[in-house]
């Protein structure tokens, strides 16, 4: 083997080792932040909206971390507002009344609205937590 061939083989070997090492570093540089993002998303999916990612990079992962943090903050704010609203409703003792009916195929819309309205007011007259039913077109009673 000549000195040129040996130098070429050594250069190719060193180049291959450097390329392999560079590839490993690039994969780690992608996998670490991606694993952090995935862990934060999994925690948020389970309802832990306190998850935040440190924005240590000025690349795409830094932008992604910032967006994920804003999303988590918005979800946390929404959850807190919902909890406050639920507490207000519970403390105020607000009652909710609902009414529905199943119309016959040939019933005009006005008769449907009138039937629902009558059932709603019948339930209100009888007090809270009431269920008022109107027999169906086939003659079956509500709740039967």
Image (cartoon, rainbow, N blue to C red):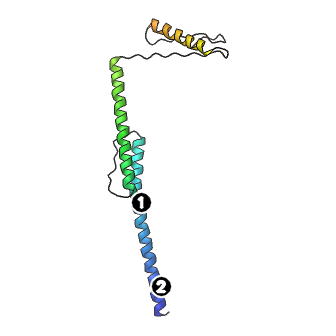
Numbered label attached to residue 9: 2
Image quadrant holding the C terminus, namely top right
Identify the secondary structure beneath mark 2.
helix
Residue at (49%, 17%) from the top-left corner?
98
Question: Is 121 above or below relative to 23?
Answer: above
Residue annotated with mark 1: 30
Closer to the observer: label 1 or label 2? 1
Question: Is 73 above or below relative to 85?
Answer: below
- State which tag comes first along the sequence, 1 or 2: 2
Question: Is 87 above or below relative to 68?
Answer: above
Q: Nearer the viewer, residue 82 or 130?
A: 82
- Residue 116, percent from left and from top: 54, 13
Residue at (44%, 68%) from the top-left corner?
23
Residue at (46%, 9%) from the top-left corner?
124
**Which residue occupies the extreme top position in the image?**
125
Q: Residues within 10 Å of mark 1 (few under 14, many from 20)?
A: few
**Mark 1–mark 2 distance (CA, rounded to whole Å):** 31 Å
Q: Is residue 77 visible?
A: yes
Numbered label attached to residue 92: none
- Residue 32, percent from left and from top: 39, 58
Whether residue 139 sits left or right of residue 129 in the image: it is right
Q: Is residue 144 visible?
A: no
Question: Is 79 above or below relative to 29?
Answer: above
- Residue 61, percent from left and from top: 39, 55
Q: Residues within 10 Å of mark 2 (few under 14, many from 20)?
A: few
Residue at (41%, 16%) from the top-left corner?
95
């Amino acid at each position: 083997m000549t000195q040129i061939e040996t130098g070429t083989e050594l250069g190719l070997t060193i180049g291959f080792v450097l390329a392999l090492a560079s590839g490993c570093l690039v994969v780690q540089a992608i996998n670490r932040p991606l694993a952090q993002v995935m862990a934060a998303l999994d925690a948020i999916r389970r309802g832990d909206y306190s998850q935040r990612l440190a924005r240590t990079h000025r690349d795409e992962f830094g932008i992604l971390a910032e967006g994920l943090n804003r999303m988590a903050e918005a979800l946390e704010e929404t959850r807190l507002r919902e909890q406050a609203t639920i507490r207000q409703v519970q403390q105020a003792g607000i009652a909710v009344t609902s009414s529905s009916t199943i119309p016959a195929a040939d019933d005009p819309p006005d008769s449907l609205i009138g039937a629902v309205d009558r059932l709603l007011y019948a339930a209100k007259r009888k007090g809270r937590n009431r269920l008022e039913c109107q027999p169906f077109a086939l003659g079956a009673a509500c709740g039967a």
